[in-house]
Image (tube, rainbow, N blue to C red):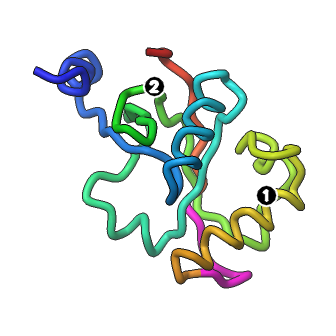
Amino acid sequence: MSRIDDLKIRYPGAIAWSFGDTPEMADELAELVAKGIKTASCSSLSSFKHEDAAPAIGGYSIILNSKGDPVCVIRVISMRIIRYCDVDQDFARKEGEGDLSLRYWMQGHKDFFQREGSFDEAMELVAEEFELVEVL
């Protein structure tokens, strides 16, 4: 039985996934979560709808690094739909990236969503906030 399988027994219904679209991003963001700096994330509503196993309020996620190794476990405490253009400084800070500013968040996420092929200033995002449950 793998380490992820063991964790799924301890955290029933848990899903395992990594952040971002590059190995470097997966490692960097997993580390920010494990340090308690990153307590929020978002995805485009369009990609969220197409995920096989999407996070849900109260659900557990096993965060993986770029090698597929579990780094930590989080639990989603809130979710909401918000437009990209309506994201505020508070949410940008909770994302924990860069200098924690809204300006940094907007540029980084614009770049990410452009790579995904879904960027629009008025696009809808699924904004999640989570708590760190366990560092592995």
Which residue is tagged 1? 105
Write the residue at 51% across / 56% down. Answer: 22
Horizontal and vertical percent position of residue 127: 60, 54
Residue type, numbered disc 1: Trp
Of 131 and 26, the residue lying toward us: 26
Q: Which class describes the residues within 10 Å of circle 1: few (<14), some (14-19), or many (20+)? A: many
Gap between marks 1 and 2 measured at Cα = 23 Å
Does residue 131 lie above or below 57 as drawn?
above
Assign a secondary structure to mark 2.
strand
Write the residue at 67% across / 23% down. Answer: 36
Query: In this picture, which residue range is highlighted in magenta?
Result: 119-126
Write the residue at 40% across / 46% down. Answer: 55
Q: Is residue 7 rendered to the left or right of residue 74?
A: left
View extreme (left): residue: 1
- Say whether residue 123 is magenta: yes
Horizontal and vertical percent position of residue 88: 83, 57
Quadrant of the rendered structure where residue 16 is? Answer: top left
Q: Which class describes the residues within 10 Å of circle 2: few (<14), some (14-19), or many (20+)? A: some
Magenta stretch prevailing secondary structure = loop
